Image: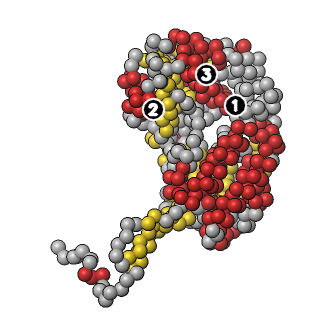
Amino acid sequence: MSSVQKTVSPVNGQVYVERPHATGSEIEQCLVTARAAHPGWRNTTLSERAAICSAFVDALLANGNHIVEELSWQMGRPIAAAPGELRGFEERARHMIGIAPQALADIEIEPQTGFSRRIRREPLGVVLTVAAWNYPYLIAVNSVVPALMAGNAVILKHSAQTPLCAERFAEAFATAGLPDGVFRVLHLSHSATESVIKDPRVNFVAFTGSVEGGHAIQRAASDGFTGTGLELGGKDPAFVRADADLGYAVENLVDGAFFNSGQSCCGIERIYVHQSLYSEFVDRYADLTRQYRLGDPLDAATNLGPMVRASAADFVRGQIEEAVSQGASTLIDPASFAADAPGTAYMAPQVLVDVSHDMRVMTEESFGPVVGIMPVASDEQALTLMNDSRYGLTASIWTEDAGAAMILADQIDTGTCFMNRCDYLDPALAWVGVKDSGRGCTLSALGYEHLTRPKSFNFRTEIQGRSDQSIRPSLEH
């Protein structure tokens, strides 16, 4: 008998949905079916794949009203903000479908008399996507759609917090007419997930989650030669230069820190402000933060929902308490947020000053509604502090001087550097991390490189009675 996966809603602390974990026989059937379906799918034309993947997007969006409500129940995002996830899902999916003909086209090598040479991007086989709960549709689509467009079969294992998102993918693909077995969903325990990763019939694992989870994925994959793409954590910094548009920077950095209750790998977790702007920036930042409405995410007036679970909120509260004990000051009174309740998932946003890199809240991923703000005297000091992290997912610079921003951006150890924006994924750009933020790449044309393998073709088209002996390098030493 299989175990049961229970999804506890952060809205009310009650079980929202239950699903049995896949049994050993169900996992085996899924792997057999995926391997059997792959050859037929890889032999379809790119236009056929695009038509089916586009129909999938249409089918999922047609169920949008139902999806956004159950999304709030599963992970707590305010229902007023939930439609934005579907807009992002559509943007990424349609972009990756649209660029596939160019991204997957053969690479033609310069002409050589008597030869035809090219490099083709071949599908890997079976791709396992292990998706996270914080942006469950956006994260899954990053690998699922391009993997299918590249000719792979896909197995989706979604977070236990958001199992219905995986099922909505499966329903939409069925409506779109995707051949049976090309896309499958498995609800798996941790041990079963490890076993699937180790199975030689899985050729690539696309994982989004914690650094610890990334290490576990890498260990499991290391038993063979399974490729991995790991999108992990972040402690993303922002630097507000002396020439920044202060109001614009405050508005966007408040949103960048507290959208989705701070539960974003590329959310703003630490801010460095030039000392000439520091006092005014902090005052305006705290004032705007106090305007958030924490409460029931199903209420359209709510713009700050609960964290995903009480234990996650308690972790962030612990970081704050520890920082205060080390000399940090809080600027937000949690009592002014009626829904804030220690021991629950409902947590007020917090802004910390008098912080330093001796505090975990400035160096360890928080993944919650808290941000620390420090004054800096120069670009050089800001650069040093921004790079003083084991993470490197995104960083942002707020300035009116694009030249100065480029000089800084070129020296920041990060996967993406923004100027005058933050917490955003542009599907035309490669989404990557450095250091403990991960490895590999999704989105953009480069994202297809990780879901395919190169295959070279070297055809002699003119035979003139000469063997290759005459052009081979000598083996004599």
Q: Residue at x 62, y 64 (%)?
A: 46
Of callouts 1 and 2, the N-terminal one: 1
Q: Residue at x 43, y 18 (%)?
A: 376
Depth order, front residue of 463/291: 463
Report if the CB atoms under discs 1 and 2 are less than 8 Å apart.
no
Q: Residue at x 76, y 48 (%)?
A: 61
The quadrant of the image that shows the C terminus is bottom left
Residue 254 at x, y = what percent? 61, 23
Secondary element at tag 2: loop
Q: Residue at x 77, y 36 (%)?
A: 72
Identify residue type, mark 2: Ser
Q: Residue furthest toward the bottom?
A: 465
Q: Mark 3: few, some, or many residues within 10 Å (few <14, many ≥20)?
A: some
Judge from the rendering whether residue 379 lies leftward or rightward of residue 353; answer left or right.
left
Residue 290 at x, y = what percent? 67, 16
**Looking at the image, is 378 positioned above or below residue 8?**
above
**Looking at the image, is 156 positioned above or below residue 7?**
below
Report if the CB atoms under discs 3 and 2 are less than 8 Å apart.
no
Location of mark 2 (residue): 389
Location of mark 1 (residue): 307
Identify residue type, mark 1: Met
Q: Is residue 52 visible?
A: yes
Identify residue type, mark 3: Glu
Of callouts 3 and 2, the N-terminal one: 3
Location of mark 3 (residue): 251
Secondary element at tag 1: loop
